Each structure stands twice: as structure tokens, then as C-alpha cells.
Amino acid sequence: MSRVKWHAFLVTIYLLTKSEGWELTNTSTPIIEFKNVGLSYDDNEVLKNIDLSLEAGKFYTLLGPSGSGKTTILNLISGQLTATHGDILFEGNIINDVPVEKRNMNTVFQDYGLFPNMNVFDNVAFGPTIKRMSKTDINAKVTEMLDLVKLSDYADREINELSGGQRQRVAIARALANDPEVLLLDEPLSALDYKLRKDMQYELREIQQRLGITFVFVTHDQEEALAMSDWIFVMNDGVIQQNGSPEDIYDEPINHFVADFIGESNILDGIMKTDYLVHFTGKDFENVDAGMRPNERVEVVLRPEDLDLTTIENGKLVVTIDDQSFRGDYYEITALDDDGNEWQVQATNKAEIGERVGLTFDPEDIHIMRFNESEDDFDARLESYEDDADDAKE
Amino acid sequence: MMKKIKWGNLYLWLMFVVLYLPIIFLITYSFNAGKVMQGWSGFSLKHYGELFADTRILEIVVNTFLVALLSSLLSSVIGTAGALYIYNIKHALTKNVFLSLNNILLVSPDVIIGAAFLILFTVMGFSLGFTSVLLSHIAFSIPIVVLMVLPRLQEMNRSLVASAKDLGANNWQMLTRVILPVISPGIFAGFFMAFTYSLDDFAVTFFVTGNGFSTLSVEIYSRARQGVSLEINALSAMMFMVSLALVLIYYVISTRAAKSKKQGTRLVLPASEGL
């Protein structure tokens, strides 16, 4: 090889290592990716230009009210639906045209879809049987799966002899028996009673961590989403409103919808007078937000559990108790301020209806939402606060 | 102690007596030693003897059951396929058109269907006999099977199909391992109903039979016209027993199926027409 050619070869290798293509093979490829995916029926746009990226081994939740498009996303991942436009990628490969049965993922359906003509064992063995696994392998797999969902003693039961919770477990075992890389769960807990649902939330999380595979969980129950997920996508009107860790979503809702949908909120109109000073209910309050135009109109969010009752002198606001109910570990209080705004308060101390009390909260409990702020701008704003905080520490 | 009369029960019993009296009368006289239906001249099995000596009748019995069995089997297959097709039609109007076409055949008079088939076979130059009877029986049985299978499909949970696909089954595996087993009670009911319809069909068969081929109902009709022989009573009695046996078999199988699956829903008993 001539010297020049050798040099060119080395330069090429160097450039390759620098290029994005090379980087991709080094950093982990997302297991599932949506690139500008949309879905319409006739003129009805169910899903609008969705971009998302899921990492392997995490517990994701698609959270939103019915008709928000969350189940549509799930069905696009599983292949039950085909996107009108955009690309869906699995481990970096476009899978738009790959049929349901060829995708390495399985679904737990809302009504379980268990085969009534088969017993528990045969239901769980369905996938492995289709795959033509050997009898011993099938037996081992089914035993392992029934063990995982704590139904080892139920192999010979008929489906109609099982309770709702047990059917749920069979459905999970059956879906997992195919060794999917992604498990899709379509509101699987919605038919269970409260106590059972709580137990299953915990167990599902445990199963996910034990198997280390990706879970995509669809629910309209925000409490469920917050309790189980590594990462939440909040959906409404076919759009991802916000995505983030449960803490992010709860503590820093991006807009009115998210603030209202996740947990209980007091949402008020306000004005950011200057950095770190917000005006609402006719008063100025110190807060921790900055970077807005002077006198920009904003929405102010205060979580009921961040509010405390105090004496009128110590209160930042004065309110009149309108209603009160005991909730076990706190009192759920509705109070009215002098402007007529209604306040939801979760207080540890009891008050009398009609009593005038002070309401207090910390500056960092005031969450500011800009009107029509894009998710990227929102993230940038949040990051700048963290930088400010770091600067302050130094 | 006076027992209170339950008028409802009394009415029910009266109805059954009225319904079954002619059949009981007919069966009773099949054991009459005399030659006619008037006057009881003693118990005898001689009409049954005559019946079993009559090779033409025995041949016709075999023919009748052969046609019934073949036509109900074939129409079960075709009817189930048809029901699956109608079930899978997405377009509402198309679906209704197919359903209506199916139901029209079911309600249209047998005489018209029979005459239509006769004209068709004649125009096509098709010789009348076993095949023409079999084909027309299959034709009028298909809508019955469709009607019995379709509700089962509609009751079936849609997510069963989705689950089977999701777990990697192709269409054939989905059909044979999930859909057919789930709708089997409907297919079974359709088969039995088609079987009884074929067994006792007179009108359609009367038109399309020929070349010496005959079924029981047609044969009984033509013999009864020539004058009542108690041999016909014996034959009718035996046919009645066969249909009774069929109903019993059906009942036993369906209760066993219901018991083993504990599905709670018993199969719909086909409304078997009097022979």
C-alpha cells in the first residue's frame, strides 16, 4: 500500500470514529423510537406528530384521559395499528410494515383476552407452542412463568374458574412466556378492586425489575403512573403534553392540563412582575422562577399538600374554611380567599367551618407555568434554575 | 288437604297433549294387528316385519340418512366459512347485504326454493337424483348454519383474536386453535339443525328428486296417497324414535360440554320439526 493511500485510510478511520454513525454503535440504541408518527381516521387526527424514544429495561407509562391517544401509541408499538405517517423503529430498524406476530413484543390486554377453550397451562403455553418449542422446554417455561406470577398451583384450572386478579396474572404470564423484549400493558389493572390494584402495581414493578425488560404501561390513573414508572408520558388530544420522571411531572407540570390531571392542584392566574416575584390574588409573592418577560401573564400552581393552615398573622393569605373532610392521615379542606378563589388544602390540623385562618407556603412551592410554552423551552428554563442554584452554592 | 291447581302447568300439559296426541295415535296403531286405523284388533309387530322385508324402504332410509349426514356436514363447513367471512366484513352496508341475502333464503318458502332448483337443474341439463337432492339440501342448510354460528362469533371477545396474533399465531393457527374451538357450540348446533332439516324435508326434495331416488318423507307421501297402510305408521314411529334419540343425544352432549366448561350457557336446542 502506498504511503498516500495508507494516510487516506487512517484519516477515514479517524473521521468514522468522529461521525455520528460510529457514535450510534457505541451509545445504546433506543429500543423503541417514534419519528414524527401520526394517525388519522378520515379527517379525525387521533395522534399528531409524535416523537418519542424508549430506552431498554425501563418502566414507561403512557398516562392520559380516554381518547388522549395513549392506547393508540401502544397499538402502534405492538402493530395492531399502522401509522398514517412517520416511522416506528425497534432497536434502530424501521418496523412500520412488520406484522404483529413477527414483533418481539407482547401485550397484556385490558380484558386479558384469555382463551376460554384452554386451561391456565395451555393459555401460557400458547406462545411457546406456536414457536414449536420442545415439550420439556414448554413445560419448563410455563412452570417458570406461573411461578413468576404466583399461580403455580393453578395450572390445571379452567379460565372461568379464576378470579379477576388471577386472570390478570395468567395474562401477564402468557405474554411473558414468549420472552418479549418489550411488554405492553393496556390498562391491565382497571378491572381490579382498589386493594388488588395496589398489590398488582407493586408486583408488576417487581416483575419488570426482575426480568429487566422494557414495560410500556397505559393507564388513566395518575396515582398508578406515579407509583410504578421510571418515566411518564402525559398525553392529551393526541399530543404528548409532557414527559419526565414521576417527580418532574408532579413537581413541575408544564401546563394547565398536566397540573390539573396529575394530582390535585390550585391553579390561579398571575403575573411575573420581575424575576423571583410573582403576583396573584392581589398580592406579591417571592418565588424561585425567573427568565420571563417583565409582567408576563402566567398560571400559578400550588399543590394542596404544600399548603398549611396557620394563624391569620402568620398567613401569606387569609381564607375562610368552606368545607372539611377527614381522610385518615390528613384533612381535606376547601377554603375561599377574599377574591373568591377556591383553595384545596390538605392539612394535618383540624379547622372549623366558617373559621378565618391564615394560609402559608414556601417560595419553592409556587410553580409557574407560561402560556403556550413548548416542552423544549420549558426544559431549558428548568435547567437554567438548576444552573442558578449551582452558581449560588459556589 | 286441597292442593292448589296451578293453571299454568295445566295449560302446559294440555298443550303437550294436543301436540303429541296425533303422534301417539299414529304410533299406537303401528302395533295394530288389523290392516286399517279404525278399530283396534290386537297387538302385533307384523307391520314392522313388513317394513323390514321391504328392501326399497330400507334403501330409502339409508339414502335419507346419507343425504342428511353429507348435506349437514358440508353445509357446516361452508356455513362456518361464510359466517367467518361475514363476521370479518368491515363495511357495514356490505355486511348487511350478505346477512340479508342469507336470511332471505332462510325465510323463503321451501316450495319456491324447490321449484327454483328444479328449473336450474333442468336448464343445466343436470339429471335429477341423489346429487341434485344433496346439492339442494346443502343449499338450504347453509343459511341455517350461518345463523347459528354468527352469534357465537359476535359474542366472542375480539381480544382473543388480537391475543392469538400477539402471541405469534398465523391466521391458520388462530382459526384452528382459538376461533373454531370457541365457536364450536354454534357449529355443532348448526350441524344438528341442518341434519334435522334435511332429514324431514319434503317440499324441496319432492321437486328435485327423480330417477327412482327418493327420501323417506317423499316416499311416505306417495304411499299415503295410494291408500293408508299401517306399514307407514311403523315407519313414521321409527322415524319419530330416531328424532327423539337425536334430541336426547344432543341434550346429553351439550350438557356435558356445558358441565366440563362450566360456561353456564347451554347450547341452543334446534327447533326440530315434527316428522
Image (tube, coloured by chain):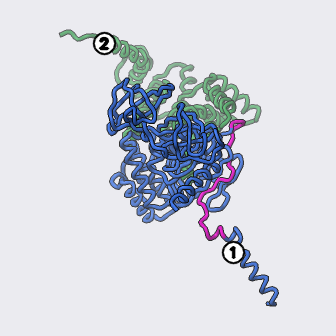
Residue at 44 percent across and 48 percent down: it is: A227
Give, as a single range, the part of the protein colored magenta: A23-44
Q: Indicate the colour of chain A.
A: blue
Q: Are marks 2 and 1 in contact (CB under 8 Å)?
A: no
Q: Tell me if residue A29 is in the magenta stretch.
A: yes
Residue at 56 percent across and 36 percent down: it is: A279
Q: Chain of mark 2?
A: B
In the foreground, A336 or B164? A336
Report x, y in % for residue A339: 51, 26
* Element marked by disc 1: helix
Amino acid beneath label 2 = Lys
Report x, y in % for residue A120: 41, 50
Q: Are marks 2 and 1 on the same chain?
A: no
Amino acid beneath label 1 = Thr
* Residue B83 seen by the camera: no
In the foreground, A201 or B240? A201
Report x, y in % for residue A54: 58, 56
* Element marked by disc 2: loop
In the foreground, B85 or B18? B85
Relative to A233, is A32 above or below? below
- Which residue, given by chain and number where applicable, does mark 2 sit on? B6
Residue, far bottom: A2
User: Counting other residues with Cα less than 10 Å from the Cα at mark 1, is it few (<14), some (14-19), or many (20 or more)?
Assistant: few
